[in-house]
Image (cartoon, rainbow, N blue to C red):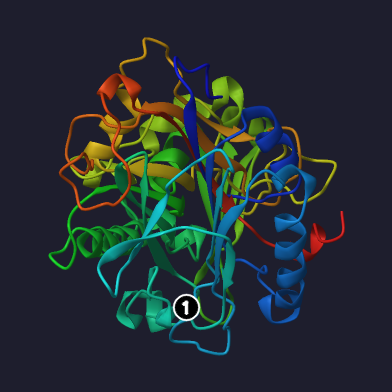
Amino acid sequence: MAGKAAAPGTAVLLVTANVGSLFDDVVHTHKPHFMALHCQEFGGKNYEASMSHVDKFVKELLSSDAMKEYNRARVYLDENFKSQEHFTALGSFYFLHESLKNIYQFDFKAKKYKKVTGKEIYSDTLESTPMLEKEKFPQDYFPECKWSRKGFVRTRWCVADCAFDLVNIHLFHDASNLVAWETSPSVYSGIRHKALGYVLDRIIDQRFEKVSYFVFGDFNFRLDSKSVVETLCTKATMQTVRAADTNEVVKLIFRESDNDRKVVLQLEKKLFDYVNQEVFRDNNGTALLEFDKELSVFKDRLYELDISFPPSYPYSEDRGQGRQYMNTRCPAWCDRVLMSPSARELILKSESEEKVVTYDHIGPNVCMGDHKVMCPRRVVQGRPRGAGWRGAAGRAPGPQPAHPALAKLVRVYLIVIKYQKVDRYVGR
């Protein structure tokens, strides 16, 4: 949680996962000044039927008691599911507290900042909205060139004379556990690597001035499956089951060599049934972090705070099983909040001596869908040193503090929401 600040502060919250009572709890407890909520698969997997619930959810959210002190908001919803070449099902929400003054958002078409006033909701054809950049990945990036809802949305903000990009992202999943197991790293890891590299190249190209950036959403990062299976099944023997008509491998069964040939793990296309789920929860699953390798490719371009929470996916969607993983996939830290080198300085360096950085998930014992909500929180200095910051010489408009000691502190909240089945929460 965000700690006490040495001076009046500005709070920024960035989110990615499933909402539920998020706003009542988080907003009441932490009182952020600037809250950014990134949703993926907005409307759920059955979006044609569920999208009708989205508008009601958004209106109830904006008018809720928890949000009554947020007098400015920007909501960007990609609802146009009929446009296959553009539809991403991403939703980006930004809420500004009434005490926060002189906040500006970047117009990518006019290439200038505009003061944020009032509450505005944009949906359907976000491609024509100048206050953001939205892209679906090129079709040849998609496995087997089959369209799915994967892409990114980028907005740029100026808060406390500091400019930064917030990027909502959804990368490709592992279509088959069996295919993921075949090689190390898996073929799916390579596809995600290519897509994430595309996003990073886009947000630091020459079209706009470079600023600090936060990329948060569902990266679908997975543990190195082959290495995990070898570790979990060290003393087991493998039985291969093939389809009678095609001879294709459809199931792998790992049995202990003794102990009555007890089954340790069963692996199918959409089955990862391991005998002891506590492995993924003990000490928050950190013993398995050695197999979390996908981010290492970007070690010079992206940073992450230390992980001290259990894998964020795939949790049971049974309301009474908030801590239980489904046996569909190997648990992994799919939902992340990543940042550029200068953004890392933004949240880790402050003149305040207090250690107020927290990177955690929300609702560990509560059913929130198959993904848990990720939320790092931080109080940071409004005018620090380092690339990407906008001081008195920057182009961002707005009053400048007379002295750095008077600069406002910024509490940064980053929240990732894999928001599925929106109809579950409407009317609660």
User: Where does residue 149 sit, x and y in percent of width and height?
Assistant: 50, 73
- Can you tell which quarter of the image residue 230 is in? top left
Between 165 and 51, the one nearer to me in the picture: 165
Q: Residues within 10 Å of mark 1 (few under 14, many from 20)?
A: many
Left or right, 219 with reference to 187: right
User: Where does residue 51 sit, x and y in percent of width and height?
Assistant: 70, 76
- Can you tell which quarter of the image residue 344 is in? top left
Residue holding disc 1 = 126
Q: Is residue 421 visible?
A: no
Left or right, 172 with reference to 112: right
**Helix, strand or loop under label 1:** helix
User: Where does residue 129 sit, x and y in percent of width and height?
Assistant: 43, 77
Left or right, 261 with reference to 11: right
User: Where does residue 38 sit, x and y in percent of width and height?
Assistant: 53, 55
Looking at the rendered structure, the kind of residue marked 1 is: Leu
- Can you tell which quarter of the image residue 350 is in? top left
At a point 29% along the width and 75% down the height, the residue shown is 109
At a point 76% along the width and 56% down the height, the residue shown is 63
Give the number of marks. Answer: 1
